[in-house]
Image: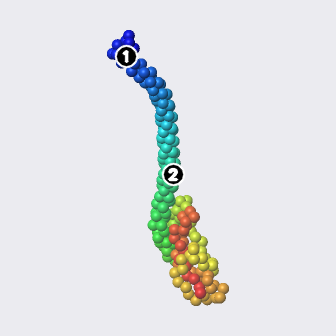
Amino acid sequence: MSNKSKVEEMEEGPNNGQTSESTELNGENVGVEQGDTLKEEVSVEDQLREELAKEKDKFLRLFAEFENFKKRTSKERMDLFKTAGQEVMVSLLPVLDDFDRALKELSKSEDKEMFKGVELINNKFNETLKNKGLEQIEVKQGDAFDAEVHDAITQIPAPDKKLKGKILDVVEKGFKLGDRIIRHPKVVVGN
């Protein structure tokens, strides 16, 4: 120390000590920083995986929702066609009733050619409706009354005990379109 001036000692002494300590601290900092960087990379990777999983889940849910939408709209479209056909058929039923009444009256007249002409038109009309799925519900006198199928207009005293709860008369024919009843047969029931 005697050879060196105080200025030199101060420059060398504190700097040498600080430099080695700071280098050691910087070495530790570098190790800590590298560990932090690895943790950050791992956590960023985990975050990205989570985000990817969430997006995949959203995509799958959206895809399933879209498939359900397609099925639902397809079913609704089919139902619409069925009900549209049903509405047309229901509106044509009074015309069928009118044809039946006309044929009944024309059978009493002497003009057999007129009867044959109207009967031919009636048969073609019935055949066309049958091809479109319209079916007459067969009901005859003496059949058992079924509240799910028949519509009781009135009840009258049965002329015979065997006819109690049975159909005595058919006032209006009933029709089905496919499996669905679009007009219940109107009947008179004996009690």
Find residue 159 and report its horizontal and vertical position in percent. Answer: 61, 89
Residue that extends furthest to the top in the rendered view of this protein: 3
Q: State the residue at coordinates (51%, 51%).
A: 68
Q: State the residue at coordinates (51%, 63%).
A: 125
Quadrant of res 7: top left
* 125 to 30, vertically: above or below: below
Q: State the residue at coordinates (54%, 64%).
A: 177
Quarter of the rendering occupied by the C terminus: bottom right
The residue indicated by pointer 2 is 68
In this orientation, which residue lies closer to the viewer: 71 or 118? 71
* 134 to 144, vertically: above or below: above
In this orientation, which residue lies closer to the viewer: 154 or 109? 154
Residue 191 in view of the camera: yes
Residue that extends furthest to the right in the rendered view of this protein: 162
The residue indicated by pointer 1 is 9
The label on residue 128 is: none
Query: Of the residues shown, which amino acid type is indicated by label 2?
Result: Asn
Question: How far is disc 2 from disc 1 in space, using C-alphas?
Answer: 85 Å
Q: Is the residue marked by circle 2 packed among few (<14), some (14-19), or many (20+) residues within 10 Å?
A: few
Badge 2 vs badge 1, beta-carbon distance below 8 Å: no
Query: Of the residues shown, which amino acid type is indicated by label 1?
Result: Glu
